[in-house]
Image: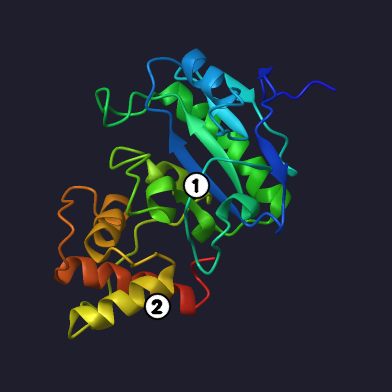
Amino acid sequence: MKDELVHHSRLSPNFGVRAQPISMVVVHYTEMASAEAAIQRLCDPEAQVSAHYLISEAGEVTRLVPEDKRAWHAGASYWRGHRDVNSASIGIELDHPGHGLGYRPFADTQIDALVPLLARIVQTHDIPRANVVGHSDVAPARKSDPGELFPWERLAEYGLALPKPVITLGDPFDNDGAFFLALERFGYDITDGHKAVAAFQRRWRPHRIDGEIDGEVRAILFQLLLDRDRGAAR
């Protein structure tokens, strides 16, 4: 049966069996010269990488791995207690040059294709907004994609990702140790503290990414946790 949201199927041999139910979506960029080059790599057995979907800048969606299989997209990663992120997630690659080949805004046509695909995934698997994340969120020490120009707020408008919180109570953390404990509680791997803070900033305060803890960053994190504890951030 034809899938109205998927234009092509190029099934990759790079997949395995899931060990956990699906509870996350991880968004990536390809950082390659073209969508076709990325597809070839994601289908190359020697590369040992894959994703469930790739979306070209023109908005064409290619299925690479069935959703019920474990694709190899996240690598060594962590999010909210999950250390086998690949088993718990669906990976979506966006055709994009990335920071290495000329970082730029994401094409509207690409995001127009992402929104309905993501909406179906989230509904099918009952994935909370807080678990729609970027690669840099789950692997802050290694990755920076999809980066500071990715339009998270557009996804949030459709209820597909958490919006930037409205700060109501300011900065409650009196030392960096308390902040890092809270950052870990929210979901991040804090093994490399500086990079974990930079990843948090890339997602929640993209206009300044320096890896330094300041009052604005502390206030954003506190509000995110407060919203979650109130049940407003599923």
Give x and y (percent) for residue 229. Answer: 48, 79
Residue in the foreground of this view, choosing between 98 and 233: 98
Task: Say which mark, if any, is on residue 75.
Answer: 1
Q: Mark 1 packing: few (<14 Cα in 10 Å), some, or many (20+)?
A: some
Please say if 136 is above or below 176: above
Check disc 2 and give the amino acid type: Leu
Give the residue drawn at x 47%, y 55%.
Answer: 77
Which is more N-terminal, label 1 or label 2? 1
Asked if 185 appears above or below 216 in the picture, the reply is below
Q: Position of residue 185 (x, y in %)?
A: 42, 75
> Disc number at residue 61?
none
- Alpha carbons under labels 2 and 1: distance apart: 30 Å
- Residue 107 image offset from top left, x and y in percent: 39, 23
Q: Which residue is mark 2?
A: 226
Quarter of the rendering containing residue 215: bottom left
Q: Check disc 2 and report its element: helix, strand or loop.
A: helix
Q: Amino acid at mark 1?
A: Gly
Quadrant (top left, top right, bottom left, bottom right) of the N terminus: top right
Q: Residue at x 72, y 57 (%)?
A: 19
From the top left corner, tell me how far across and down residue 214 is, in percent. Answer: 14, 68
Of circles 2 and 1, the one toward us is 1
Circle 2 crowding by C-alpha within 10 Å: few under 14, some 14–19, many from 20: some
- Residue pushed farthest bottom? 174
Residue occupying the point 34% across, 79% down: 181
Tell me where residue 53 sits by quadrant.
top right
Q: Nearer the viewer, residue 57 or 65?
A: 65
